[in-house]
Image: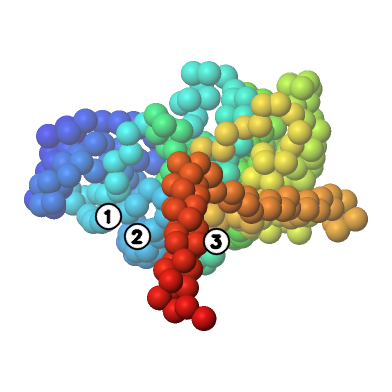
Amino acid sequence: MNEGMLLNNRYQLLERLGTGGMSDVFRARDLMLERSVAIKILHETYSDDQAFQDRFRQEARAAANLSHPNIVTVHDFGFDHGQLFIVMEHIPGKDLKTLLRQRGRYSVDDAIPLIVQACAGIGYAHRAGLVHCDVKPHNMIVTPDARLKVTDFGIARALSTILPDERADVVWGSPQYFSPEQAVGEAPSPASDVYSLGVVLYEVLTGALPFTAPSSDELARMHLESDPISPSEYVPDIPSALEEIMLKVLSKEPAARYRTADQLGRVLLRFGTQRDTAPTPALNLTPEAANSYQQPEPPPASQTPQPSISIPEITLPEIYVPEIDWASVGLGLAALLAVGGLIPFWIYIFFLYNPR
């Protein structure tokens, strides 16, 4: 399909945003609601298979029920001109893989907030019973103000219906980022998404992938058998606590990792708020991402500083001493003398008229 085409008499294709082996992405105009949207149109190779069409619709419905600030919202899906398409909110920004190609790698202070947001979105899907299956930086859109949104939920799972044996013959996800269990064709679990998040975190911090090989088979073998190069060999000043987190996430056994993306997000958030290096990273998170995770636990009682007891100052009331009005005192004394001076006169009058 090309720019200018109309899908389902509603979506006008405006410009091609990207092309991949599975689909093309266009910026489009929703003529009914008069808003800008992004449309992913799957290639005819996938759209011709009826089983895939049914599974695609099922996964698209499930993805449309996800409502989270770190997940790209699915508005609609359909079939037109012999091709399946899915309509999503249009996010201004670039995918994380493109940004990595441009800048090489991220600092710890810049990387942790991005991955915590990815964990918040994918963790929300895990709580809803959905596994992404194809976590990679290509499926993470970063806006100019450093907000991250995860896209393409369920499409990798829908691809499994093209071949009859999902577990043995289909390799889920992308070879550079899939988990060891996905490498042998097993259905992914939330711990598989956690492993893929670990690969993304490794790449974001070091600018390199933990495993590189010329073929998918060799990559699969390395995910199953090889240990990744320590991140500190690429970035010597990476905090040792963060390196331990990354290597734990890349464990071969799912049980040795964090079970869900929420758990990984809490660990990274705690690391970002507790590490004692300066400056402390400013975790630029969406409100829900920030509120989704527990804050660091308080120190034990033995380490908690005892509060100091302060005795409040007692302020005594001031005693009011009135000022003496000497003019009034003088007048009073004069009046007293005047009255006192009349007493002998009245005694004389009394005895004059009342002789003995």
Q: Which residue is mark 3?
A: 126
Q: Which mark is residue 292?
A: none
Q: Secondary structure at mark 3?
A: helix
**Residue 236: percent from the left, percent from the top?**
78, 21
The answer to the question of whether label 2 and label 1 lie on touching residues, with beta carbons closer than 8 A, is yes
Q: Secondary structure at mark 1?
A: strand
Q: Nearer the viewer, residue 263 or 184?
A: 263
For badge 3, the amino acid type reads His
Q: Nearer the viewer, residue 182 or 101?
A: 101
For badge 1, the amino acid type reads His
Q: Residues within 10 Å of mark 2 (few under 14, many from 20)?
A: some
Q: Secondary structure at mark 2?
A: helix
Q: Residues within 10 Å of mark 1 (few under 14, many from 20)?
A: some
Asked which quadrant contains residue 78, the reply is bottom left
Q: Nearer the viewer, residue 95 or 328?
A: 328
Q: Earlier in the sequence, mark 3 or mark 1?
A: 1
The residue at 29%/41% (across/down) is 90
Q: Which residue is mark 1?
A: 75
Left or right of 346, for residue 174? right
- Label 2 vs label 1: CA separation? 7 Å
Q: Is residue 22 visible?
A: yes
Q: Residues within 10 Å of mark 3 (few under 14, many from 20)?
A: some
Q: Earlier in the sequence, mark 3 or mark 2?
A: 2
Which quadrant holds the N terminus? top left
Up/down of 44 relative to 94, above or below: below
Q: Is residue 221 visible?
A: no
> By what rule are the colours in the image chosen?
rainbow
Left or right of 38, for residue 111? right
Asked which quadrant contains residue 204, the reply is top right
Up/down of 110 relative to 48, above or below: above
Q: Which mark is residue 64?
A: 2
For badge 2, the amino acid type reads Ala
